[in-house]
Image (spheres, rainbow, N blue to C red):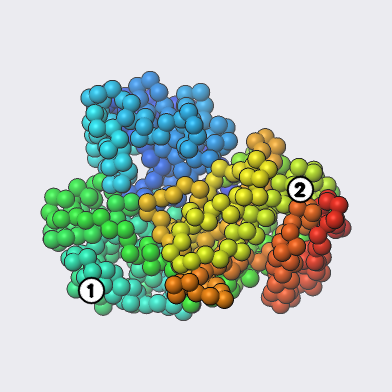
């Protein structure tokens, strides 16, 4: 991975390709060394999660322990190593990728697939008296309790020193990037107002203080950003807020310049990151709130020794997920600029492919990053671009490698899933394109996926409805054909923060921590279909949850619906209009009319205006089937 030459907020753009830096020889060495540590500590098994002390989904290189020991580079994976076995659990987004990256030493455990036990089930089947080791700094209270509840006959052994790190030579340094203020003109709300809301929650719960571990929550709460994690503008820190309105921020102070402290200095104390354990021991009294899903066992054990720790789902996470009017307008504005960039890229790519010039998955992603970098308020990518052609598109979170990537082929489907971090919002968009002649089964599948996008966007639902209850609407068209996809339909998105954000989402699996959708939530709408070794299709828009205008209000209930933020045309060459209803045809035409009008007004590029006029031309419902009328390259 290419490092940053400047702080994130000074960059024109960021583009990187994730390369496989963990060679089989290095992985085997770490695996062997870990087994030596198992014997030394008399352990039956050792657990290695893919996260950091703050339960971050994406982590800096120094916490990519799963990749270091196994070679698997996906963002979600858990490893258990025994003297005889090496097991890796991951979800459906990564089955194909894990099958490629893991060697014969490893066994892939597929989550939510019949015949594969969950980690908790696997632990419950260990012999009585077995010793299951773990690093308490990177295992949350919820993870620990879930395993302990399932496997009561084994001993869970916390070992403060991470046993994998013992033999991880040249482990990357801990990040320490410059912290900068994110002004109220973008956030729409001063930090002190957010702190007051946290104090109100403490009062409601009759608590003295709350300890916050999640990095995105801390960045949002204090209106601060940095670059400790690629594509996610956060910084390693802890925070504590007391019921007197005072806050403590723990971070590396040498990277925290005085001007960035100005807004929060009157009510915030600044302490070193490594002092958190000592200070919590000294100051935590009475009832102290924490979130079991983001708080590590190491922090919890400190709290348990000196106060009454009580789990309370983070009120900061809930507040952060509801965008205020300034944030919502920022999302709309940055999606226009992002739509111009993506449309310019697709126009350029279509011309290059049509005229027979070579473009690879990597050079294509590079060009897209360049187009994004021209936009106002652009800071970085929001994740590594998934630029995938033909069979590579079946790998849901595919990362192109310059040494092995494919050319983008005219008659193959090309899936590009990408996004940007802007000072006024975060984007995440997927389009699937064919520059030549798509196969009938590809047209059929694309149209069914599109029907799912339309269905979810068109839903009108009462307030207090969870995304889980809406999930089937995005899958129904595929289900009718006996098809499906094995990833979530939607995830929350932060405002110039994480591209994945809880506690909302749309998924076939319910979660006890899931919150109902509310006005102001931003989430993705991304059904898909994948055929291993052949092709992949995904369409993704970001949606803003807004009030719905209904004729009646049953029991005075407010109803909600979704407004599409993403601005980029669909490839109508892939639409079989005979599979669409008349309402769906009108939906596509209305969306394309809005895209054409909005992006034409936002860009002076006359070539783009012409391209948009073609791509956004109205479609009609076919009487005899077949794809929509083909348009010239």
> What kind of element bears circle 2?
helix
For the residue pair 202 and 29, the one nearer the viewer reads as 202
* CA separation in Å, label 1 and label 2: 58 Å
Q: Residue at x 24, y 62 (%)?
A: 210
Cβ atoms under marks 1 and 2 closer than 8 Å: no
Quick check: 19 above or below 124? below
Quick check: 309 above or below 344? above
Q: Which image quadrant: the C terminus?
A: bottom right
Residue 389: % across, % down: 70, 44
Is residue 285 left or right of 319 when viewed as pictured?
left
Residue 47 seen: yes
Say which of marks 1 and 2 sits in front: 2
For disc 1, the neighbor class at 10 Å (few under 14, some 14 to 19, many from 20) is some
Mark 2 sits on what residue? 443
For disc 2, the neighbor class at 10 Å (few under 14, some 14 to 19, many from 20) is many
Residue 195 occupies which quadrant of the picture? bottom left
> What kind of element bears circle 1?
loop
Mark 1 sits on what residue? 245
Residue 596: % across, % down: 74, 71
């Amino acid at each position: 991975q290419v490092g940053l030459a400047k702080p994130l907020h000074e960059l024109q753009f960021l583009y990187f390709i994730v390369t496989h830096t963990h060679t089989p020889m290095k992985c085997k060495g770490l695996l062997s060394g870990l087994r030596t540590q198992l014997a030394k500590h008399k352990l039956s098994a050792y657990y290695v999660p893919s996260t950091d002390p703050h339960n971050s989904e994406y982590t800096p290189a120094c916490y990519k322990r799963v990749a270091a020991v196994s070679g698997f580079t996906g963002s979600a994976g858990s490893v258990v190593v025994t003297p005889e076995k090496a097991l890796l659990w991951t979800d459906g987004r990564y089955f194909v990728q894990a099958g490629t990256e893991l060697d014969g030493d490893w066994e892939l455990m597929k989550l939510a697939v019949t015949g594969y036990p969950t980690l908790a089930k696997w632990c419950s089947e260990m012999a009585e008296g077995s010793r299951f080791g773990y690093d308490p700094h990177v295992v949350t209270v919820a993870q620990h309790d879930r395993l302990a509840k399932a496997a009561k006959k084994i001993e869970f052994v916390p070992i403060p020193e991470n046993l994998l790190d013992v033999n991880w030579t040249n482990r990357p340094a801990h990040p320490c990037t410059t912290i900068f203020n994110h002004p109220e003109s973008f956030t729409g709300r001063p930090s002190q107002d957010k702190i007051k809301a946290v104090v109100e929650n403490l009062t409601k719960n009759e608590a003295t203080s709350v300890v916050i571990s999640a990095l995105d929550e801390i960045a949002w709460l204090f209106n601060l950003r940095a670059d400790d994690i690629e594509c996610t503008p956060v910084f390693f820190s802890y925070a504590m807020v007391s019921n007197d309105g005072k806050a403590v921020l723990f971070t590396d102070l040498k990277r925290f310049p005085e001007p960035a402290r100005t807004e929060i200095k009157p009510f915030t104390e600044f302490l070193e990151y490594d002092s958190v354990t000592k200070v919590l021991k000294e100051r935590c009294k009475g009832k102290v709130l924490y979130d079991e899903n983001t708080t590590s066992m190491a922090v919890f054990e400190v709290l348990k020794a000196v106060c009454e720790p009580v789990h309370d789902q983070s009120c900061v996470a809930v507040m952060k997920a509801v965008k205020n009017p300034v944030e919502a307008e920022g999302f709309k504005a940055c999606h226009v600029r992002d739509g111009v960039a993506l449309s310019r890229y697709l126009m350029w790519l279509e011309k290059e492919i049509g005229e027979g010039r070579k473009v690879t998955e990597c050079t294509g992603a590079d060009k897209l990053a360049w187009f994004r970098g021209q936009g106002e308020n652009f800071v970085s990518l929001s994740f590594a671009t998934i630029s995938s052609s033909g069979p590579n598109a079946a790998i849901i979170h595919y990362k192109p490698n310059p040494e092995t990537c494919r050319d983008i082929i005219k008659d193959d489907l090309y899936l590009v899933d990408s996004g940007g971090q802007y000072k006024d919002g975060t984007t995440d968009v997927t389009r699937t394109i064919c520059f030549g002649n798509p196969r009938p089964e590809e047209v059929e599948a694309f149209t069914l996926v599109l029907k799912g996008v339309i269905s979810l966007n068109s839903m009108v639902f009462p307030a207090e409805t969870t995304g889980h209850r809406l999930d089937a609407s995005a899958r129904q068209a595929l289900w009718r054909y006996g098809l499906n996809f094995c990833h979530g339909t939607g995830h929350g998105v932060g405002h110039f923060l994480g591209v994945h954000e809880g506690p909302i989402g749309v998924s076939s699996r319910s979660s006890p921590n899931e919150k109902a959708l509310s006005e102001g939530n931003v989430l993705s709408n991304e059904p898909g279909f994948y055929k291993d070794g052949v092709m992949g299709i995904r369409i993704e828009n970001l949606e803003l949850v807004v009030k719905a205008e209904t004729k009646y209000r049953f029991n005075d209930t407010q109803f909600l619906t979704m407004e599409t933020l993403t601005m980029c045309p669909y490839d109508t060459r892939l639409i079989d209009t005979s599979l669409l209803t008349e309402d769906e045809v009108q939906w596509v035409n209305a969306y394309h009319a809005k895209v054409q009008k909005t992006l034409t007004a936002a860009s002076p590029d006359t070539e783009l205006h012409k391209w948009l006029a073609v791509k956004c031309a109205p479609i009609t419902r076919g009487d005899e089937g077949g794809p929509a009328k083909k348009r010239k390259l």
